[in-house]
Amino acid sequence: MSYQADEHGFYGSYGGAYIPEILYKTVNTLRERYLPIIESDDFQREYRALLRDYAGRPTPLYYAARMSRKYGCRLYLKREDLNHTGAHKINNAVGQILLARRMGKKRIIAETGAGQHGVATATVCALAGMPCRVYMGATDVERQRTNVERMRMLGAEVYAVESGNKTLKDATNEAIRDWCCHPDDTFYIIGSTVGPHPYPDLVARLQSVISEEIKIQLAEREGRDYPDRLIACVGGGSNAAGTIYHYLDDERVSIVLAEAGGLGTDTPQTAASLSLGTPGILHGSKIKLMQTDDGQITEPYSISAGLDYPGTGPLHCNLYESGRANVLAVTDAEALQAAFELTRLEGIIPALESSHALATLPKLTFKTDEVVVLTVSGRGDKDMNTYLKHKDEIDYNAI
Ligand SMILES: *Cc1c(COP(=O)(O)O)cnc(C)c1O
């Protein structure tokens, strides 16, 4: 049994490509062409060169000595926060723009919630000299001013979406609508392991450079190329997919996924769609969703904008259901505490999303000398307002 997608894009009972008729040809062409292109020498040469010289890869695998002492394990941090534009999202955006060019596309669209994927896409469009329109909910445009200005400075058009709750789900709907109107010349750069097949597999492969590097770096540091445990946060699932990709079928490695519990999984203010969601179809894929009994999507809530999506990608739904991954819901308060702890113990201010991964450490028990790799998906600069607002709620004595 494999945890990878089958030829129809199913991970167990999740995934697939549930798309409108008008997109069938476009998605099918992408499905036929993505593997030959991304596996070609020509693509790999350009992709690897950009990851190295432009994004700043390989990212360090940092042994966190003070955190290790505190938790009684050997904790390594995979430093995706040190990438250009501040998170892992650039790995995917670089790969998809190269794919778009090889498929002869002339125009790029993307959806964004907090603006991180929008910034990564606007960045690679500037790099490639391609026009770019980013769909963003009007509420998010208001909340994430700096990222909107970054996208505009990079030359992208930011389209404020006024429908629905005016957040990520609505921005994605609008991007799909645009794609339906321009299926021939437009490439849709999706930001996570979500959407119709082949996107979840495409994005996982483009992010798999993370675990490829972990293997090499661990072999150098520990004399074996696998950890006992991997930990990552999940929004749509891309940084986690990249972290676990080369270890999915290696049962020596246990997998911990941190999803956003919000104010708690016993409240409506949560985004814990793996723990609480039910199967349904959103944005072309069968996944676990936060929805009402009659199938209306409920607005997710998390302090972290990047984890605030009403579902999780099909790969992770299957890992949850099969028991391959241990999924923990982390509350806002736990994530905030973890952010300040990493900052004070290691001098690294993590993104709020990554803080959810860090907050699983006190919930786990470790064997002596257990080797743990935790992905710090992004840096905390963008979250400084939130951190300052909550700094008096932190228990500094517990650090
Ligand atoms: C977008 C984002 C996430 C969540 O997205 P995934 O696709 O689940 O990785 C996590 N961390 C950071 C820093 C992000 O910007």
Image: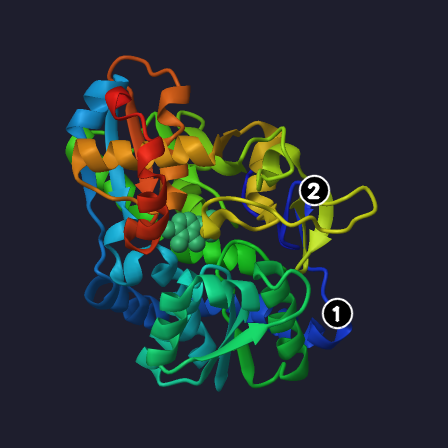
| Quarter-of-image position of residue 250 | top left
Which quadrant: the N terminus? Answer: top right
Binning the other alpha carbons within 10 Å of mark 2 as few (below 14), some (14 to 19) or many (20 upward) gives some
Whether residue 379 is visible here, answered yes or no, is: no
Query: What amino acid is at disc 1?
Result: Pro
Colour scheme used in the picture? Answer: rainbow
Q: Is residue 208 above or below residue 108?
A: above
Query: Which circle's residue, 2 or 1, is located before the other in the chain?
Result: 2
Residue 161: horizontal and vertical position, in percent?
60, 72
Whether residue 217 is visible here, answered yes or no, is: yes
**Which residue position holds label 1?**
20
| Quarter-of-image position of residue 196 | bottom right
Q: Are marks 2 and 1 in contact (CB under 8 Å)?
A: no
291 vs 105, nearest the viewer: 291
SS assignment at label 1? loop
Report the residue at 44% width, 73% height from top.
99
Residue 224: horizontal and vertical position, in percent?
24, 30
Residue 366: horizontal and vertical position, in percent?
34, 16
Query: What amino acid is at disc 2?
Result: Ser
Q: Is residue 94 above or below residue 83?
A: below
Report the residue at 37% width, 33% height from top.
230
**Which residue position holds label 2?**
13
In the image, farthest residue toward the top: 368
